[in-house]
Amino acid sequence: MSSESFPQTGARNQTEVFAVHGADPEVLAYAMAKYSRSALSMRESLTEISAQRAEQFLNTFYFQYGHRSIADLAHIAFAVERLSLLAAIVLVDEQRWDGQERSTRYQNFLKSGWYLPDFGSDAASAALYTQTVEDLFAAYQRTTGSVLEALRQRIARPEAMKPEAYERTLRARAFDVARYLLPLATNTSLGQIVNARTLETQVSRLLSHPVAEVRDLGQKLREAATGPAWNVNAQAAAAFVARLAADPELAAEAANLLTREVRTAPTLVKYAESNPYQMQTQADLAQAAAELYGSLPIAQAPVVDLVERTESLEVELAATLLYSASHHPYRQIRDIVAELPEARVNEIIELGLRHRGRHDELLRAFHAGAALRFDILMDIGGFRDMHRHRRSTQILQSFTALHGFETPHDGDAAGLAEAGIVADYQAAVRAAHDASTRIAAGPAPEAAQSALYLLPLATRIRCLFKMDFAEAQYISELRSAPAGHFSYRRVAWEMYQAVARQHPSLARHIRVTDFTQPIDLLQR
């Protein structure tokens, strides 16, 4: 067949790729969505689309027809500043989330401030809360200085290493230990970039939370998305428009182009409200858990328990639902549920679905069937680093002092024992736990929730991580590396060992770093 037989216009077509900058998030989402409904190019679509047309389109296809994937195309950047560590953990608990937070490993948090809940007329609880936070920060300061000096005494500076690099590295190692004393009330800041669909889910989840600060954060996120955004170029643009004042017509045109008010997601997030499905279901599951095993002591469990698959999918679903409303280990819950009649197991699963609305996604607990299930009990500080691994399904239990706390040992942590401050450290954490318990029993509004802010990052927390082999390999290799924090290095090593016991032929392909071997503390 000759070349003349083919359409010459098609033969000359070339693939074109170009980045798009300057379009409002919702307008860009509309333009991308038009690929499925129009033959226009992106340039043509963006040229003819206005914010008003985008709003009309999204109101029809997103809200009326339920085409939620359209919101995946609108990405929005947020700065969230001066929120507590507790609120930050809740905020970032999204499987589709990208962002960065202030690092407790590289920054001194002494000047960050802290969150004070509303204690109403309960002046005694407010005073105890304030004193406890101040005591923890004082212990944080003492620990940082003592551990840093202990490290200086033990580790000599290599001649090839600059003094400022040596000091910076040792200070980071000292913060690794001192951060255990930071209470969940400590202020932090973070940046996040999420699509509008994730944002809507996030806002709804925050508005449904029992902690007042978290609910307020959800409200502020919705307002930030639907209201005027901060424009980094606004000041320079306004100055340029002022220079055009001699030509009023040109100045007006420039002002409209350069200084117009931009609202990042005025349509897609405006209906985000608290979620009755989540709130009512959690209450039902808490009651079911209390009835089934609430009086049973919490079973002893290792730091990492790779729970082998012996149960049916139905039992896994029921056990996972109850796990989120409990403080017991997954293995203990799983074994109890496995002994229940089939009808009772199905009733528990039904609890997770009974209140589901028309547009509600299933709870995260229904992400079942993963080959590897790691039930991990570790300090909150180290958990926050593990929390970033979003290729896994994470079922997080609530904060509590029931599991005790971690005391950094010699080796990687190096410092508490050498500096002679182990007793001081432990006394500070125990005093905070005691104060938290006393405030939780007090008359203040949301007393039980307010008390959680006093828990230091040393406090243990339990979380179920479900994943495939590739993610287990990735976490074991990445988090066991010598530059990492000793808390999650230990967890990564325990994860590897658990895989090696159950799947030895697969574990040999994991390039893990042995946590039990000494490392060079000057390597970051």
Image (spheres, rainbow, N blue to C red):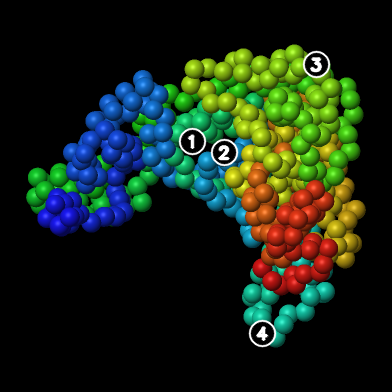
Task: Check contact, mark 2 vs mark 4: CB within 8 A.
Answer: no
Type of amino acid under label 1: Thr
Name the residue beneath numbered marker 4.
160
Q: Nearer the viewer, mark 1 or mark 4?
A: 1
Q: Residue at x 89, y 38 (%)?
A: 300
Nearest the viewer among 506 and 29 is 506
- The amino acid type of the residue labelled 2 equals Glu
Q: What residue sits 76% from the left and 17% below the top? A: 342
Q: Left or right: where does residue 13 sit relative to residue 154? A: left
In the picture, measured across the screen, residue 129 lies left or right of residue 213, that is right
**Dot 3 surroundings within 10 Å: few (below 14), some, or many (20 or more)?**
few
Q: Nearer the viewer, residue 398 or 239?
A: 398
- Residue 21 percent coordinates (x, y): 30, 51
Q: Secondary structure at mark 3?
A: loop
Identify residue type, mark 3: Pro
Label 1 with label 2: CB-CB less than 8 Å: yes
Q: Counting residues from the N terminus, which is met first, the one under dot 1 or under dot 2?
A: 2
Name the residue: 76% across, 67% down: 148
Q: From the viewer's perspective, is the residue at label 2 or at label 4 nearer?
A: 2
Secondary-structure class at tag 1: helix
* Residue at numbered disc 3: 341
Q: Residue at x 17, y 48 (%)?
A: 254
Whether residue 448 is visible, yes or no, is: no
